[in-house]
């Protein structure tokens, strides 16, 4: 097993360093924004810029890769990441930060896409589960480590911003200097959201709600920790607890959904999300330990639910439709991530930081409730071609889904349709 991981060491090291910088950036930005006295609505507009850039990159970046290659684009994007975070430190104006965060979102999504498409091409059926489970763990560990760098400096100075830019730049080295073969250049993935909705309404609606939840937390979670009075160390621990809960829940949720109607698992996840969100409201202001435990419970369903919808959509697809479905789900999820902070931000501004979890309660209720309604509307086996395995997702599932669609599209263009299933995103194998 260890020998099979050698070709991926440089990519995983780049991922680790990039996620450390990502974790630091994701926490220091809201901490500084709150310290500047900006309203939650203002911070929401900054967050919207990030999600717009992130979503658009998954569509635009492949064109650049096709024109000049993976390594050159990767170098350019990571350079933009360094520039964007440095500009945030020298021009502290929320209007400028909207632009800087848009650039950052575009660059980080493109960087993910390059690394993940590279991994997708190099894995085999024998090492797929091991490589991508390690990749998911790498993204989590890097994000958590980056968040714990915030207490080591003063967010009101430029030190943490400069440190973030340095780590982003260093993450270039392992991939830029690797001798591993480069992946084939992808082509633009197709998408047809109306067709996807007609085929699987619960997948589309669920992907949108999953994106809204993810976008709201990734962009406003740091604001929540600051506004309820947690120290930077306590806030980093809360964010880490949520990510750890998400990582630990991936396999149990995936295996459960592989053995029964996935929509039943969606209903259960929605119910757990409602209960956990209400519990977060109840324990706010109490013991930090209890807050961390409940945050882990929220995380156990916050990120994994998107993968449930992707798997369900693929269950209802013919093999030659995987590319179209992956692309459509990517777009729907991206729109959801944009809408999340736009809805949650004004609510937090008016009713206080804890109301973020009131929004979560509503979203989780809609998620589980819609899945329950669809169970009553259509039998589990209607239209199902063959049940696919649950696909593990990293912290940012959008880029992973994009790289899978693009990689599959490249294979299709080469006339090897029968290999699509072998080049998609990682799949947990059933025991």
Image (cartoon, rainbow, N blue to C red):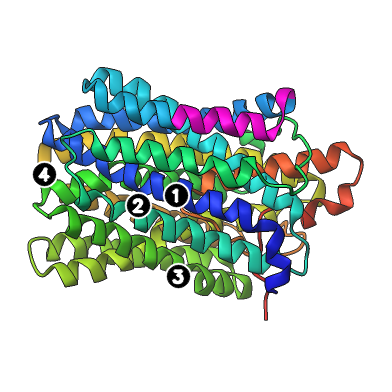
Which residue position is annotated with label 3? 249
As measured in the structure, the alpha-carbon distance from the residue carrying label 4 to the one carrying label 3 is 29 Å
Q: Position of residue 6 (x, y in %)?
A: 69, 63
Q: Is residue 101 left or right of residue 177?
A: left
Is residue 214 something one can see in this rendering?
no
Q: Earlier in the sequence, mark 4 or mark 3?
A: 3
10 Å neighbourhood of mark 3: few (<14), some, or many (≥20)?
some
10 Å neighbourhood of mark 4: few (<14), some, or many (≥20)?
some
Front position among marks 4 and 3: 3
Q: Are marks 1 and 2 in contact (CB under 8 Å)?
A: yes
Q: Quadrant of the C terminus?
A: bottom right
Q: Earlier in the sequence, mark 4 or mark 2?
A: 2
What residue is rendered at 45% in x and 54% in y?
370
Residue 348 part of the magenta-drawn span:
no
Q: Magenta part of the protein: which range?
A: 67-81
Which residue position is annotated with label 2? 146
Which residue position is annotated with label 4? 352
Secondary structure at numbered mark 3: helix
Image quarter of residue 110 = top right
Is residue 130 something one can see in this rendering?
yes
Q: Is residue 89 above or below residue 325?
A: above
Which residue position is annotated with label 1? 19
What predominant SS class does the magenta segment belong to?
Answer: helix
As measured in the structure, the alpha-carbon distance from the residue carrying label 1 to the one carrying label 4 is 30 Å
10 Å neighbourhood of mark 2: few (<14), some, or many (≥20)?
many
């Amino acid at each position: 097993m260890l020998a099979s991981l050698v070709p991926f060491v440089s990519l995983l090291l780049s991922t680790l360093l990039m996620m450390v910088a990502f974790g630091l950036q994701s926490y220091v930005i809201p901490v500084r924004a709150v310290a500047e006295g900006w309203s939650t609505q203002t911070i929401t507009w900054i967050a919207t810029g990030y999600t717009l850039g992130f979503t658009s990159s998954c569509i635009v970046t492949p064109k650049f890769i096709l024109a000049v290659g993976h390594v050159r684009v990767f170098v350019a994007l990571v350079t933009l990441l360094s520039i964007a975070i440095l500009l945030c430190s020298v021009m502290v104006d929320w209007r400028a930060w909207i632009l800087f965060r848009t650039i950052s979102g575009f660059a980080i999504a493109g960087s993910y896409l390059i690394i993940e498409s590279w991994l997708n091409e190099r894995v085999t059926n024998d090492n797929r589960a091991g490589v991508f489970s390690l990749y998911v763990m790498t993204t989590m560990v890097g994000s958590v480590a980056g968040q714990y760098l915030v207490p080591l400096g003063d967010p009101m100075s430029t030190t943490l911003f400069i440190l973030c830019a340095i780590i982003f730049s260093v993450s270039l080295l392992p991939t830029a200097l690797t001798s591993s073969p480069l992946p084939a250049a992808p082509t633009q993935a197709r998408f047809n959201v109306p067709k996807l909705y007609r085929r699987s309404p619960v997948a589309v609606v669920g992907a949108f709600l999953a994106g809204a939840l993810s976008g709201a937390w990734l962009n406003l979670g740091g604001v929540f920790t600051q506004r309820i009075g947690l120290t930077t160390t306590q806030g980093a621990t809360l964010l880490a607890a949520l990510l750890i809960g998400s990582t630990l829940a991936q396999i149990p949720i995936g295996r459960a959904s592989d053995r029964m109607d996935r929509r039943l698992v969606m209903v259960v996840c929605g119910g757990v999300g409602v209960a956990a969100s209400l519990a977060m409201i109840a324990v706010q202001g109490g013991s930090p330990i209890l807050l961390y435990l409940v945050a882990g419970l929220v995380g156990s369903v916050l990120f994994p639910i998107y993968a449930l919808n992707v798997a369900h959509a693929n269950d209802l697809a013919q093999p030659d439709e995987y590319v179209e479905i992956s692309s459509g789900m990517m777009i729907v999820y991206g729109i959801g991530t944009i809408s999340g902070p736009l809805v949650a931000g004004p609510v937090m501004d008016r009713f206080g930081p804890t109301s973020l979890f009131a929004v979560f309660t509503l979203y989780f209720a809609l998620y589980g409730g819609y899945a329950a309604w669809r169970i009553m509307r259509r039998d589990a086996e209607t239209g199902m071609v063959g049940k696919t395995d649950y696909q593990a997702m990293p912290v940012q599932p959008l880029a992973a889904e994009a790289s899978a669609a693009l990689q599959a599209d490249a294979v299709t263009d080469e006339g090897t349709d029968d290999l699509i299933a072998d080049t998609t995103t990682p799949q947990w194998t059933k025991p």
